[in-house]
Image (spheres, grey):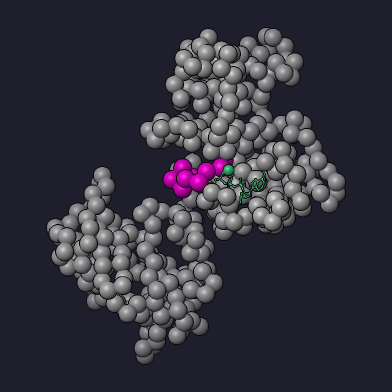
Amino acid sequence: MVSVAIINLTKTYGTTAAIKDLNLEIKDGEFFIFLGPSGCGKTTTLLCIAGLLKPDKGEVWLGNELVTSSERDVYVTPQKREVAMMFQDYAIYPHMTVFNNIAFPLEVRGEDKSEIVKRVTATANLLGLSQLLDRKPRQLSGGQRQRVALGRAIVRKPKVFLLDEPLANLDAKLRVKTRTDLKKLQRELGVTTVYVTHDQVEAMTMADRIMVQRDGVTEQIGTPEELYNHPANLFVAGFIGSPEMNFTDCTLIKEGARLWLDAREFKTPVPTQVAPKLESYVGEDLIMGIRPEDLYERKSVKGSTQKNALRMTVDIIEPVGPYLLLHLRKGRCSLVARVKHTTARVGQEVDIEMDPSKMHIFDKKTAKAII
Ligand SMILES: Nc1ncnc2c1ncn2[C@@H]1O[C@H](COP(=O)(O)OP(=O)(O)OP(=O)(O)O)[C@@H](O)[C@H]1O
Ligand SMILES: [Mg+2]
């Protein structure tokens, strides 16, 4: 088990900059996730850590060992890095039994027969494959096959796991179960894990920390809670959370001593505790963000004292399990509120309140979060 450090990493394919000056430190034993839309550079970064790809610039460190540096002309081969990589389209050998599939990397390395039996048995136990060791892949379910591929990756006791969308081939239900199993397994083994996904729910539920990438650039690194509660910019705010955060264009105005966000259809006071941070933006265009769960129907708030509810029309009501999503509209402003229940009907007007302490404010010019 080791930490992983990436310093000023850059990789360009022709004219496409896949990674632009990436800096990152992954802690020993951490479950770290690269999250971002298709083409943002996740796989490229992983391949550079594995040594399957040489970057144009920058360094990769595994613990105290420098394994890649174009400047210092260092390049350690993938075999010598002791990392295990599993791809989305993992291949397990169809003509081999589960036992032989898992044993394969040890055999290639010329391990002792008795050591191989010991290690394969232990790995199969860990993954719940003990009863299936004599079967061939075609006699297994998708999830079981996926666990065999995982078994083959972990049997070598690597220092680092690199997993590229390993659950993408599984159906939705199995993916949820395997997600939990994989996280438990990672905790038990304590192996530093770098995991790639474009699925924000997967990232939020599994990761110790997440790096959100876009177009080869890091948008934010943080724990799932940090990304959710304190997104650094509009991209992260919109990418994480489902249904996504509501965004409304507004202008910051000052009336007397009080700051207001004026969105034309409604005006909402800036909470006094954050007002000092906004003082210099008076007259500027801003974007206000509020998550659907931080909007309420006034009726459902006991003893409400807010004066500034917004009266909006209910467009659609979507039931999603324990919640309802109210799609609301007023003029050019539309919002989604997540509520537990409602008596409102489509076409009716409702008074909506927001929790001002949950408000996010972004600079429209830079897209960066101000509060
Ligand atoms: N061998 C290659 N030759 C040219 N361009 C490439 C090559 N591999 C990747 N790219 C480009 O580099 C960028 C990053 O690709 P990468 O595979 O790292 O993305 P990704 O985040 O893993 O995407 P996905 O979620 O679709 O797997 C993309 O624009 C891609 O088209
Ligand atoms: Mg990829």
The residue shown at (22%, 69%) is 312
Estimate the x, y position of residue 24 in percent, counting from the top left.
66, 52
Q: Residue at x 62, y 57 (%)?
A: 217
Residue that sits furthest to the front in the current view:
14
53 left or right of 166 in image: right
Quadrant the N terminus occupies: top right
- Residue 248 visible in the current orientation: yes
Q: Quadrant of residue 112?
A: top right
Q: Quadrant of residue 354?
A: bottom left
- Residue 191 in sight in this render: no
Q: Is residue 326 left or right of residue 250?
A: left
Of the pair 4 and 105, the residue shown nearer to us: 105
Position of residue 92 relative to residue 258, above or below, is above
Q: Position of residue 306 (x, y in %)?
A: 25, 73
Residue at the far bottom in the pictured view: 256
- Number of numbered discs on residues: 0
Viewed as shown, does residue 22 lie left or right of 167? right
Q: Position of residue 350 (x, y in %)?
A: 19, 67
Segment tinted magenta in the rendering: 195-204
Residue 246 in the image: state x and y as whole percent: 37, 63
Q: Nearer the viewer, residue 174 or 253?
A: 174
Q: Does 369 appear in magenta?
A: no
Front-lying residue, 162 or 170:
170
Image position of 354 with respect to 260: above or below: above
Q: Which residue occupies 17% across, 68% down?
A: 349
Q: Is residue 196 magenta?
A: yes
Residue 358 sits above or below residue 228 on the image: below
Question: In the image, what residue occupies the spot 68% across and 13% down?
Answer: 115
